[in-house]
Image (tube, rainbow, N blue to C red):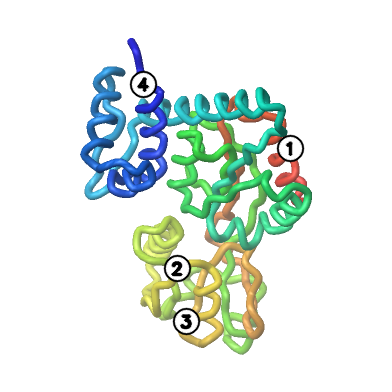
Amino acid sequence: MVVSPDALASFAVFADHLNFTHAAAQLRISQPALHVKITKLARELGRPLYHRAGRRLVLTADGEAVARFARAHDERLAQFLTEFAGLAPQRPVVLAAGQGAYLYLLGDTIRAVLADEPTRLRLINCDHRQMLAAVRTGQAQLGVSVLDVLPEDLTTVELATFPQVLFVPAGHRLARRRSVRLRDLAGSRLVVPPQHRPHRVLLEQAMRATGAEWTVAVEAEGWPLIAQFVALGVGLAVVNGCVPPPAGLVARPVQDLPPVTYHLVHQPAALTDPRVASLLERILSRG
């Protein structure tokens, strides 16, 4: 079996975008030409590399493995050429995480790493599904997210655990309590993430189990905007306990919701790279 290095490199770009138009534009080739490359690669390997899930393209497990190998091949080649030219290694470690992790957990570490060596780190902002895909395909060496189900094919390390808390104005009746229960929110208007977001799904399930009726005050993307809507008096909100309450709000633990745990995620062999191991150690030490 002979596999074209060019086809592997093209597939790695496609795996980044999962969109033929965007990947072809980055590669500066036509979309049909890219489609032919990937179709031929899949035929040569004898495995489907992606499939459609509704309107989205999703890599198969074999596709993730091919993308991971393609990136590793490119990195080894780049490292060899750099060393051959007598230059210092320039390849950054890539970290994938979501808004909450960047805002409330990783800021000090990122600031310190970039101060030491600005070219050492590259960041990807994404949700937890995209983070897992980035780590599985080799697009990122490390990922951070809240995970409800731990992936069996990746190594996970607990980073931090927080209670779920209710953001409520300081003058609200629930602000006088040390903690609240979901039934205390009966009749409330809640600021919530968009539908199908994990936090929204879990909250709806838990409220349904209590039998408490509630209404959506507004849907908002991201903890800062959710907190801002509560501060404006639009409604109350259940958020992760790592989020600091803005002025005028208090945070009360919700007793009957489970805590949320942020995990560090990486490929089992990732820590053989000392730069990845060093970054992981700094994240765990929060600095």
The residue located at (50%, 24%) in the rendering is 73
> Which residue, given by chain and number where applicable, does mark 4 sit on?
4
From the viewer's side, name the closer residue of 108 and 80.
80
Tell me the amino acid under the disc marked 1.
Ser
Tell me the amino acid under the disc marked 4.
Ser
Choose mark 2 or mark 3, whichever is in front: 2
Q: Residues within 10 Å of mark 2 (few under 14, many from 20)?
A: few
**Cβ atoms under marks 2 and 3 closer than 8 Å:** no
Secondary structure, mark 4, is: loop
Which label is found at residue 52?
none
First in sequence: mark 2 vs mark 4: 4
Tell me the amino acid under the disc marked 2.
Glu
Choose mark 3 or mark 1, whichever is in front: 1
Query: How far across and how far down the image is residue 279, in percent?
Result: 70, 41
> Which residue, given by chain and number where applicable, does mark 3 sit on?
235
**Cβ atoms under marks 2 and 4 closer than 8 Å:** no
Q: What is the C-alpha distance between the residues marked 2 and 1?
A: 33 Å
> Which residue, given by chain and number where applicable, does mark 1 sit on?
278
Q: What is the C-alpha distance between the residues marked 1 and 4?
A: 34 Å
From the viewer's side, name the closer residue of 19 and 249.
19
Q: What is the C-alpha distance between the residues marked 3 and 1?
A: 43 Å
> Which residue, given by chain and number where applicable, does mark 2 sit on?
221
Choose mark 2 or mark 1, whichever is in front: 1
**Cβ atoms under marks 1 and 4 closer than 8 Å:** no
The residue located at (49%, 68%) in the rendering is 182
Please determine whether, in this image, residue 132 is positioned above or below residue 258: above
Q: What is the C-alpha distance between the residues marked 2 and 3?
A: 15 Å
